Image: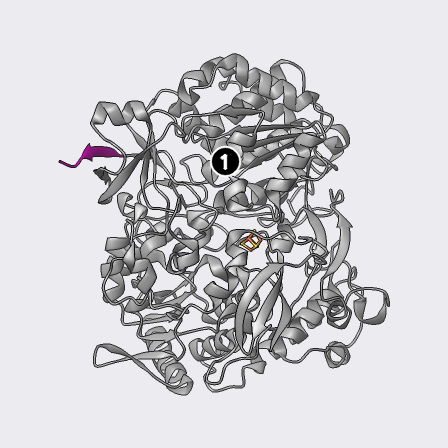
């Protein structure tokens, strides 16, 4: 007997609502939920394969603990005992910073990943924190921190209303959107064109998104910041700057005019390989459009000037008056955001409050570069102890960080390692303890992070579609128990973590004059919380304290968990609205257009004009049926065009004697790989492309399908030394490489 259940899709940032078909405890089908207030029935091939992802037979069912050198099945109690011994032993012998924490991308796709890692990090007190952000979007956080005082205040293009969209380094027809949560992103781009709007795509590859565009500009990789700076230059030179209603909230416009003086279209044309008149046209069109938005993504972030490029994206939106207005780029307001405080000067954003021990990389947003993880483990210095224990949560840095071979060896040298991971993969195979979360159908879902990036304000929550299998532990309980074991409270009830957070949050809220609960008794408020468990009580608290919340009775029509549960397809909270100056947290209380760290980094960008590359460079690529390494184990999502091949332009191929399906040796600073070529004119001359997350050929893993077509690890071509200095983000695009045809 089958039934249906609702579940928000966790497989990419679009967060589509799914209707699952469930037979017994097995998910046998998935279709788009037509009544979902946000996605309205949209689904992509990944979401349609939810059942296969969920039911992957290679998922671990019980914890594993290393005994006599072998990972063996163990009870949960044995596993957490081992975590407490392993982590606390290292903390006591070497100090908190000798415990490293690595958080992988799936943390932002789970309730547990949103609620518990902050408590774990605060309790541990370690500065050795690494996440997937520094191989992805950290430049955007840093530029937002510097411009707006809040690293998480990221404006998104108002896709449903804009007249003119300029995409740079983004391929939403394959990714379905990133740092811009928009179910049916492809449909929204088509709707933009249908209503007479224009779409420009800047990308060295002629991607599916580029093919949809009115204009595609195949820029030289890594030069996005130069092109954007030249557009800003043109706006000033041609007197096209018009901040509109933003003007009273922005400082530094004249200083910016001076700062971009060296970046005329004529000065950058050779570096970008884009004609100067075309750059001027792009600037004029942006200024002339009734509404417009510039949106940059991974191709403009994972480059040597990632923070400058990310900053310039918002600079262009500001100079044309498009930031914070409908049709431009707006800041979403999520239901679980903190209670908005009144506008005014705040604490600002700081970089480099501490540095990594070996290469002295500055922290950004409390994190060190993932590229530095291996050296922080394997290199002794006089500065302090190396990392001796590692806690990896949903992270596979052996494949996702530069120079996986070095990290692979470094992990073997740790005193202790625990992985929270459903798979025995290239990283978790090194762990002493593996704690497997249940399949997604057995977890509740809410998007804490992606609702702060959504193109429409809305809120949705789905309870587990399938009951927890016997022997499984809820992911929230795993992370709560891990937090307790790692922070010296092993054995306490996991609800202690939730109670601690609830007590602290309410205690703070009642002291804030702008809070709806100002002056009330935190205990009385805590007693009002509803929910079946600690995580639900925390979500109830966040909703009720949030911008749409009921304020614990102050606004009876407001949100609470109870109200949300009564709306299983979600609650629409309306289109994005202007939020300036309220959201600014800069010291000045204004948008700081030319922050000091940016001004200090511009000379480096200026010098790049004199350093034209002459060899081949590498870029990545995304496929609709993939996301990160773990999706390669699902047969329905592999094969066909989703293959690990090297895309190369026909002229480069001919010059190098390369043909489709022949093997080529690709050599970078960090190592080399041998991979099959695919000759295509969908990439510009001088550029080759490899996808990421492949290289499933290491022993000791349990990814049986992925191992049948392992591909190669593109990150092995990097040595970890190429970083955007402001954000610590790895340079993954525009990387110099050599290739040789295999004979
Ligand atoms: S677009 Fe993303 S969220 Fe939507 S169904 Fe596909 S994978 Fe899931």
> How far across and how far down the image is residue 417, in percent?
33, 70
- Reply above or below: 117 against 359: below
Look at the picture and state if 489 lies above or below 319: below
For the record, the magenta segment spans 737-743
Relative to residue 734, is residue 233 depicted above or below? Answer: above
Quadrant of image for the N terminus: bottom right
Q: Position of residue 629 (x, y in %)?
A: 38, 56
Q: Secondary structure at mark 1?
A: helix
The foreground one among 495 and 617 is 617
Instruction: Indicate the position of residue 651 as horizontal and vertical percent values.
Output: 30, 22
Q: Is residue 204 magenta?
A: no
The answer to whether 59 appears left or right of 252 in the picture is: left
What residue does disc 1 label? 208
In which quarter of the view is residue 503 placed?
bottom right
Instruction: Please say whether residue 457 is visible from this viewpoint.
Output: yes
What coloring was used for the rendering? one colour
């Amino acid at each position: 007997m089958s039934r249906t259940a609702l579940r928000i899709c966790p497989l990419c940032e679009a967060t589509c609502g799914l209707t699952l078909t469930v037979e017994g405890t097995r998910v046998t089908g998935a279709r788009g939920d037509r009544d979902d207030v946000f996605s309205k029935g949209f689904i992509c091939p990944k979401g349609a394969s939810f059942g296969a992802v969920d039911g992957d037979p290679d998922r671990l069912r019980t914890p594993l603990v290393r005994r006599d050198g072998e990972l063996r099945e163990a009870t949960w109690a044995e596993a957490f005992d081992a975590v407490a011994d392993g982590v606390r032993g290292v903390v006591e012998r070497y100090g908190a910073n000798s415990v490293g924490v690595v958080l992988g991308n799936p943390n932002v796709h789970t309730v547990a990943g949103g609620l518990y890692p902050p408590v774990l990090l605060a309790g541990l007190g370690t500065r050795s924190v690494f996440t997937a952000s520094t191989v992805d979007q950290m430049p955007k956080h840093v530029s937002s921190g510097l411009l707006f005082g809040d690293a998480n205040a990221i404006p998104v293009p108002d896709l449903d209303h804009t007249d003119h969209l300029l995409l740079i380094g983004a391929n939403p027809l394959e990714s379905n959107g990133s740092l811009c949560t928009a179910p049916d992103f492809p449909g929204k781009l088509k709707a933009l064109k249908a209503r007479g709007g224009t779409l420009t795509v800047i990308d060295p590859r002629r991607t599916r998104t580029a093919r949809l565009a009115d204009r595609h500009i195949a820029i030289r990789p890594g030069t996005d910041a130069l092109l954007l700076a030249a557009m800003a230059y043109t706006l000033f030179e041609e007197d096209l700057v018009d901040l509109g209603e933003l003007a009273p909230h922005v400082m530094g416009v004249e200083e910016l005019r001076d700062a971009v003086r060296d970046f005329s279209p004529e000065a950058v044309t050779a570096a970008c390989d884009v004609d100067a008149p075309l750059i001027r046209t792009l600037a004029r069109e942006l200024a002339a459009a009734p509404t417009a938005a510039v949106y940059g993504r991974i191709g403009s972030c994972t480059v040597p000037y990632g923070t400058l490029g990310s900053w310039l994206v918002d600079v262009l939106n500001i100079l044309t008056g498009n930031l914070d207005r409908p049709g431009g780029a707006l800041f979403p307001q999520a239901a679980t955001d903190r209670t908005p405080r009144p506008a005014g000067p705040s604490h600002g954003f700081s970089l480099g409050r501490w540095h990594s021990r070996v290469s002295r990389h500055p922290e950004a947003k409390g994190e060190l570069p993932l590229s530095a993880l291996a050296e922080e483990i394997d290199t002794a210095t006089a500065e302090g102890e190396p990392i001796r224990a590692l806690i990896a949560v949903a992270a596979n840095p052996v494949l996702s960080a530069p120079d996986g071979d070095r990290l692979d060896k470094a992990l073997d040298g740790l005193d202790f390692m625990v992985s929270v991971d459903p798979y025995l993969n290239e990283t978790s195979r090194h762990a002493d303890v593996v704690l497997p979360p249940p399949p997604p159908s057995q977890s509740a879902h809410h998007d804490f992070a992606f609702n702060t990036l959504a193109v429409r304000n809305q809120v949705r929550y789905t309870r587990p579609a399938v009951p927890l299998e016997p022997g499984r532990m809820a992911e929230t309980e795993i992370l709560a128990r891990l937090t307790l074991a790692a922070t010296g409270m092993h054995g306490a009830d996991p609800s202690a973590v939730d109670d601690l957070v609830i007590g602290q949050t309410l205690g703070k809220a009642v002291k804030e004059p702008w809070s709806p609960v100002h002056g009330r008794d935190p205990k009385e408020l805590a007693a009002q919380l509803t929910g079946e468990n600690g995580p639900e009580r925390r979500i109830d608290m966040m909703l009720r304290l949030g911008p749409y919340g009921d304020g614990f009775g102050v606004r009876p029509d407001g949100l609470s968990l109870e109200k949300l549960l009564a709306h299983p397809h979600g609650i629409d909270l309306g289109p994005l609205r202007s939020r300036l100056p309220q959201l600014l947290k800069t010291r000045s209380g204004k948008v700081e257009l030319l922050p000091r760290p940016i001004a200090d980094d511009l000379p480096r960008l200026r010098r790049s004009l004199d350093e034209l590359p002459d060899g081949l460079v590498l870029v990545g690529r995304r496929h609709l049926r993939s996301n990160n390494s773990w999706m390669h184990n699902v047969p329905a999502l592999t094969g066909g065009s989703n293959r690990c091949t090297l895309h190369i332009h026909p002229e480069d191929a001919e010059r190098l004697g390369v043909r489709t399906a022949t093997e080529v040796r690709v050599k970078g600073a960090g190592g080399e790989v041998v991979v099959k070529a695919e000759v295509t004119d969908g990439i510009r001359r001088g550029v080759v492309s490899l996808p990421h997350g492949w290289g499933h050929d290491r022993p000791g893993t349990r990814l049986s399908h992925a191992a049948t077509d392992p591909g190669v690890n593109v990150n092995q071509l990097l040595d970890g030394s190429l970083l955007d200095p402001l954000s610590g983000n790895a340079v993954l695009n525009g990387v110099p490489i050599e290739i040789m045809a295999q004979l």
